[in-house]
Amino acid sequence: SSRRRHTRYWRDWSSDVCSSDLEQETREYEARAKDAENRAEMADSANDKKNLNATAEKFWRWADQANAALRKARGDLRR
């Protein structure tokens, strides 16, 4: 198979991770962050808003880290 062996999570990233998996991981984290932001806007209590915004920030950080791993994987694949 032309696909490389890969791990499930970007946090387990190694040179064996398939870049298409990292692309999907990034998109999933971005979608979850946007969903949390939307839910925070509609939340009734200040505490719910705070918690949902914190969740969104976490997902945005994870998306950034997965995207950084993706850029590294693509750079490694070009060599």
Image (cartoon, rainbow, N blue to C red):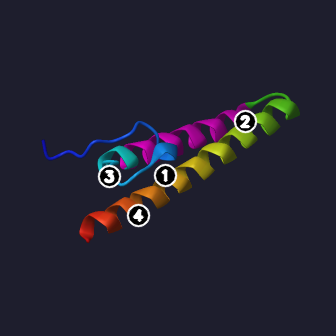
Measure the alpha-carbon separation of dots 2 and 3. Answer: 29 Å
- Extreme-right residue of the structure: 46
Location of mark 3 (residue): 19
Which residue corresponds to mark 4? 72
Q: Residue at x 85, y 29 (%)?
A: 45
Task: State how far apart marks 3 and 4 are (Cα).
Answer: 9 Å
Residue 32 located within the stretch drawn in magenta:
yes
Q: Nearer the viewer, mark 2 or mark 1?
A: 1
The amino acid type found where label 2 is placed reads Leu
Q: Residue at x 26, y 71 (%)?
A: 79
Disc 2 and disc 3 in contact, CB within 8 angstroms: no
Please tell me in which quadrant of the rendered image residue 40 appears.
top right
- Give whichever of discs 3 and 4 has the lower sequence position: 3
| Total count of labels | 4
Q: Nearer the viewer, mark 2 or mark 3?
A: 3
Q: Which residue is mark 2?
A: 52
State the residue in front, 63 or 14. Answer: 14
User: Of the residues shown, which amino acid type is indicated by label 3?
Assistant: Ser
Residue beneath the point at 30% across and 48% down = 18
Of marks 1 and 4, the one in the foreground? 4
The tag earlier along the polypeptide, 4 or 2, is 2
Label number found at residue 74: none
What stretch of residues is rendered in magenta? 23-42
Q: Secondary structure at mark 3?
A: helix
